[in-house]
Image: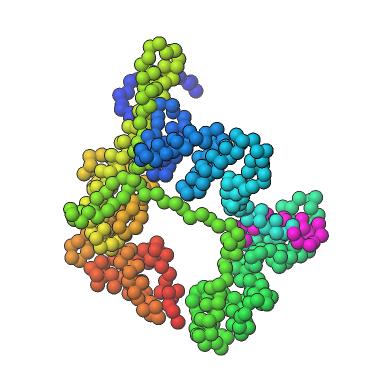
Amino acid sequence: MAMRFEHSQSMKLGQQMKLSPRVIQSMEILQLPLAELEERIEQELESNIALELVEPERDDDDEVQREDAVDQDSDSFEHLDELTHDVPEMVENEFDSSAKTSDQMGELDTGRPSSRLAGERDVKTDAMANAPARAGTLQEQLLEQWRLADVDDRLLSAGETIIGYLDDDGFLRTPLEEILERASPGLNLNMELLEEALSALQLFLDPPGVAARDIRESLLLQLDAIEADPSQQVDRDVLARVRLLISDHLEDLSQNRLPKIAEAESLDMDQIREAMDFMRGLSIAPARQLVSTPPEIITPDAIVEYDEEQDAYIAYLNDRRYANLRINEHYARMAKDKSLDKKDREFIKTNLSNANWLLDAVDQRSSTLLRVLRVVVDAQRDYFDYGPTSLKPLPMTQVAEQLGVHVATVSRAVADKYIQTPRGIVPLRSFFTGGLSTDSGDDMSYDAVKAALAEIVEHEDPSKPLSDEALAKALKERGIEIARRTVAKYRGQLDIPSARLRKRH
């Protein structure tokens, strides 16, 4: 069989859009929420000599007093501002007077040592001493506790190995057999030693319930600790019922099958409810008490307020932090100085170009975000007046067409942004949703339907909670017609349990 190779050339016309690095970075700036934008600006201020932040002007009288104080004490207290940064003004004045007295005594050469050398308290040292120490990780704190236990070295080592496998809730999810397989041969561990170490950990570690293998074991360990504590004044009959419910009926409790428990154990509903009230004081994640998660801080990008005179909602940006960015005039003049070394002049010009680009990108972000906000405020007036159930459908494509921009620009403008409104701080994206038409012909967003569903559940009879079918009928009475399966989907998204789990016996 013969093989033939051919070479040919062809031309093809086509269009390909490529975004410049500047455009890509501008899109990134548009998408940044306020906190990340401020962090980006701080980085630019540190690295770009041509960019500066103009601080708000201070009162002239305060500035004169501050300059006088600095002139008088500059020799003795070079870092006075640093030491008294968080000290009230009254205490700061006391430091000023004490500094003057110290200077005068130093001039007289009395031979007395300074207050710091004399062993008197130092403000900065006190502040550092009073600052809370950094909390260690869960494993670090548990290991620190365990090393105080009076056990032999082999048991201590086995316990340390087990602690390394505890999860963030304090549970040992890994079987001891698997821990033994993974353990280093040099530790000389065996199943008997691991079981003994686990029992010792459960008795020794605080809070009680840590090192349990499941929720049932953790709750029982907490009960054991309560019973062993003489300071706990608890009805023993109640404790016995709680132990019975945890040991034999934890699954029934989680499924709200209280009548089944009452029939099986010959208990009345009041006794079961009393035991359940006591169980609410127990923890299903005991180790979380040792390591606290700081709350997420949300900084709104914009603020919406009601103007009574205009009978309208006004939106404005929360841009006080970066509104005073500007080009450093000194370096701007240097860039035009022909006598300056060419290399230095090019360096300054590069920084000026980057600074101008950042200012333009921030201005463009502010302009786009504000335009989007005004459309949202106008379109969602009923939400601000009456609440979430009055939220209207607002597709991003509609806003993009109204503003004459691409829908991707609107998407980036609202991404991860929050706004402060008279009804609280809410995600800006929550105003953009599809919807449906009610029987009256009005448009209603899907989020408004969810809000109506949550409102119906909130006001239902807890002894006779509504099924999904009944919830669909209740919504239809409000003019909102959706299928039962849609009700179930929305209920799941709202973390609303089923009717059986919501029922109060």
Residue drawn at x 23%, y 48% is 375
Q: Residue 172, position in %: x, y?
A: 65, 61
Going by the image, does 30 lie left or right of 128?
left
Residue 295 is at least partly visible in this image? yes
Looking at the image, residue 327 lies above or below residue 229: above
Where is residue 480, by image quadrant? bottom left
Residue drawn at x 55%, y 37% is 77
Q: How is the image coloured?
A: rainbow
Q: Is residue 422 a member of the stretch shown in magenta?
A: no
Going by the image, does 241 lie left or right of 387?
right
Which residue is nearer to you in this view: 342 or 483?
A: 342
Going by the image, does 26 lie left or right of 480?
right
Query: Where is the C terminus found, in terms of image quarters?
Result: bottom left
Which residue is nearer to you in this view: 213 or 330?
A: 330
Where is residue 400, by image quadrant? top left
Segment tinted magenta in the rendering:
148-170
Q: Residue 158, position in %: x, y?
A: 75, 57
